[in-house]
Amino acid sequence: MKLSIIIPTLNEEAQIGLLLDFLSPKINPSLEVLIVDGGSEDKTIDVINHYKKVKLIQTEQASRAVQLNCGAQAAMGDILYFIHADVQPISSFVEDIDKAIYKGVDFGCYRFQFDKKTPMLQFNAWWTRFNFMFCRGGDQTLFIKRDAFFKLGGFNETYCIMEDFEFINRARKTLKFYIIPKNVIVSTRKYDKNSYFKVNMVNLWSYWLFMFGAAPKRIKKFYKRNLTMDYE
């Protein structure tokens, strides 16, 4: 099966090169990499253009749901694999996903660990092995059969935040979900700019706003008002 990796970017010059250094040697007729940029104003596009095998798509709207859907439409793969720019996949991802699909899985993700090891961050990462909604999120990467993705209608583009939670919550009602028992590596950059307590409280409150049906724009306003980030 052909696998298509889809990466949304917006002002990711500090991270995207690291991910593409890892992925580029793996690109072949059965693996493609598509980057969907939402209008970066830094040097993200310049960095991407150094990687000739990577397909670059640019959207007028800076919305991860829109960008992911756009990438899925352009992808040629039987399996879609969505990865955030600040995540390092595991080297065995092709084989892992193939095995999961062969066993009848429709979609799934990995566990994760952070790129810096502290007891508190390790505690956070430990929870990602469990099949609870509050443990999910795009940082764990997400793979799904192409036909299943489009049957569900893709990501809900009214969600300017929490689009991954909304999609997984919806997909789990009809599709077989699986957490691959291996770790991808997630950047701690959010914690580098904010305290551990603050990030966790904002994340938790955003999750409950989502679960109780708050408007995505309200959740995003709350999130950006309370966390300091030097990226989008």
Image (spheres, rainbow, N blue to C red):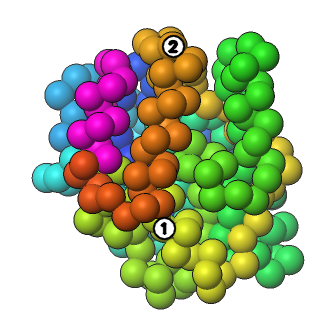
Side of 106 relative to 34 (left or right) = right
Please check the rendered image and state whether residue 194 is part of the magenta-colored stretch, yes or no.
Answer: no
Label 1's element? helix
Which residue is found at the position 70% from the left and 23% from the top?
Answer: 121
Count of numbered badges drawn on the protein: 2
**For mark 1, does the 10 Å Cα neighbourhood hold few (<14), some (14 to 19), or many (20 or more) residues?**
some
Q: Position of residue 226 (x, y in %)?
A: 33, 26
- Range of magenta residues: 219-232
Which residue is found at the position 53% from the left and 49% from the top?
Answer: 138
* Outermost residue to the left: 60
Which residue is found at the position 18% from the left and 40% from the top?
Answer: 39
- Disc with the residue nearer the chain's start (2 vs 1): 1
Side of 129 relative to 146 (left or right) = right
Q: Which residue is mark 1?
A: 167
The quadrant of the rendering that contains the C terminus is top left
Amino acid of disc 1: Phe
